[in-house]
Image (cartoon, rainbow, N blue to C red):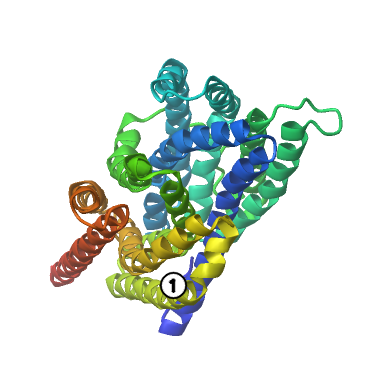
């Protein structure tokens, strides 16, 4: 990250941050997509088992990774303030915290996964595959969380191209080991969907080792001497990380888990409706990678400027990010409107599911605009270390507003299954308005503090 003086310079620097983050997010999305689709070619039971295991793991991982994401604004602000000596200290503390959280997740999983799967009343073969898939994946949880800390460190320095290269390198590793272990090629055991779990764990180890190599070898990282000194564990540093990270983690968990809840509630509307809903949600999730990437890039840029006490620049980056996300949302919405039939055809050839998917995709258009405002503002607020607002907004918009409205519309009006989507859209819009007001207040607060400091 470097100081910029014109809007053009900011646009160029922001794009250099944004594009690699976007490619990284697409790469991570593609890994999960590969696990599910390649397992589907083994058998329907393998597909169901991996899909269920993935739906259990993804909300847990996204929530936990949100906690570790606290490192990004902390490092960005220290970098902007030229407090370089604090950077290796916080990275090491975050590594300790990540390893501790990983062990905790493993213990909870060992005690609770079987009970959770049993409560879902699955076919015995599907339950066994889901359980063994999660067991296989568990071998990579510790390196995954440590890798995520190193990714936050590299991203906070503005080196998002490096994390993009790591993800792009990991994608073929994941696909190759999926091929070898799912189908039993080249002398490897034929494990079906369970093989996807081991392939994912191997990929996590690959990402961890490659990120260690980058941090050690590349001068832009090695000058911080991250692993040359192992600091004592500091509960004070953990407190700061958790104070920022827990609200981020919960807000992300509320976002990802609401769609699982809606899918379960929609089970009463029949298989065709559920299939169409899942297809539309899957594509909407892909489009969400754009505002999510803008959000992550804004956390880095705003955090850097706030740390340097350049409030005007932080405000400009915030406006730039939201404006860019809205402009892209207009384009994707138009494309989705005119090509929703072609998009639906990617998921199904059954006429009834195809028609329903096209209808759901119309509602997905409205998702684009709310996400284009809410997600970037969340990233900007995290750059200011203002994370409680995003936590509150996520809870209120999804669970206190969106889900109740959706339930009422789905069960007591003619909207039926579409009622849940209308509810979520309403909640998202309310959250976007709330977050917009919060960002304005925070920016006024920082400007007032800056003026008071200058006058003193």
Q: Is residue 204 visible?
A: yes
Residue at image point 51% right, 77% down: 12
Residue at far front of view:
351
Q: Is residue 85 visible?
A: no
**Does 48 sit above or below residue 163?**
above
Q: Is residue 153 left or right of residue 132?
A: left
Q: Quadrant of residue 314?
A: bottom left
Estimate the x, y position of residue 82 in percent, counting from the top left: 41, 58
Residue at far top of view:
111
Q: Quadrant of residue 40?
A: top right
Secondary structure of the residue carrying tag 1 is: loop
Estimate the x, y position of residue 123 in percent, counting from the top left: 51, 23
Quarter of the figure that contains the C terminus: bottom left
Q: Quadrant of residue 195?
A: top right
**Does 329 sit above or below residue 134?**
below
- Which residue is identified by label 1? 3
Estimate the x, y position of residue 317 in percent, counting from the top left: 36, 72
């Amino acid at each position: 990250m470097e100081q910029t003086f014109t809007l053009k310079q900011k646009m160029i620097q922001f794009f250099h941050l944004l594009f690699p983050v976007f490619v990284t997010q697409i790469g991570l999305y593609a890994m999960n997509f590969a696990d599910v689709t390649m397992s589907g070619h083994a058998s329907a039971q393998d597909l169901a088992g991996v899909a269920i295991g993935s739906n259990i793991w993804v909300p847990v991982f996204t929530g936990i990774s949100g906690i570790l994401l606290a490192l990004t604004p902390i490092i960005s602000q220290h970098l902007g303030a030229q407090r370089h000596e604090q950077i290796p200290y916080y990275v090491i503390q975050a590594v300790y915290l990540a390893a501790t959280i990983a062990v905790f997740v493993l213990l909870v999983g060992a005690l609770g996964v079987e009970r959770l799967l049993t409560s879902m009343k699955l076919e015995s073969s599907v339950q066994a595959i889901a359980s063994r898939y999660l067991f296989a994946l568990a071998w990579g949880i510790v390196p995954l969380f440590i890798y995520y800390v190193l990714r936050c460190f590299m991203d906070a320095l503005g080196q998002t191209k490096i994390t993009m290269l790591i993800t792009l390198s990991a994608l073929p590793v994941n696909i190759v080991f999926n091929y070898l272990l799912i189908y039993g090629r080249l002398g490897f055991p034929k494990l079906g969907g369970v093989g996807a779990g081991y392939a994912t764990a191997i990929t996590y180890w690959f990402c961890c080792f490659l990120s260690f190599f980058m941090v050690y070898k590349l001068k832009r990282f090695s000058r911080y001497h991250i692993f040359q000194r192992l600091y004592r564990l500091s509960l004070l540093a953990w407190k700061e990380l958790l104070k920022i990270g827990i609200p981020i983690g919960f807000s992300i968990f509320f976002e990802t888990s609401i769609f699982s809840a809606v899918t379960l509630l929609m089970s009463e509307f029949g298989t065709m409706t559920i299939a169409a809903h899942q297809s539309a949600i899957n594509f909407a999730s892909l489009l969400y990678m754009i505002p999510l990437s803008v959000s992550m890039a804004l956390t880095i840029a705003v955090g850097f400027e706030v740390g340097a006490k350049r409030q005007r620049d932080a405000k400009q980056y915030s406006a730039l990010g939201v404006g860019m996300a809205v402009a892209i949302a207009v384009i994707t919405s138009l494309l989705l409107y005119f090509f929703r039939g072609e998009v639906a055809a990617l998921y199904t050839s059954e006429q009834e599911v195809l028609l329903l998917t096209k209808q759901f995709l119309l509602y997905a258009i409205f998702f684009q605009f709310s996400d284009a405002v809410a997600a970037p503002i969340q990233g900007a607020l995290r750059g200011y270390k203002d994370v409680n607002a995003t936590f509150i907004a996520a809870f209120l918009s999804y669970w206190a507003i969106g889900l109740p409205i959706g339930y009422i519309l789905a069960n007591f009006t003619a909207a039926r299954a579409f009622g849940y989507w209308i509810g979520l859209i309403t909640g998202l819009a309310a959250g976007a308005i709330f977050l917009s007001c919060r960002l304005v207040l925070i920016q006024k607060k920082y400007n007032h503090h800056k003026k008071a400091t200058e006058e003193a």
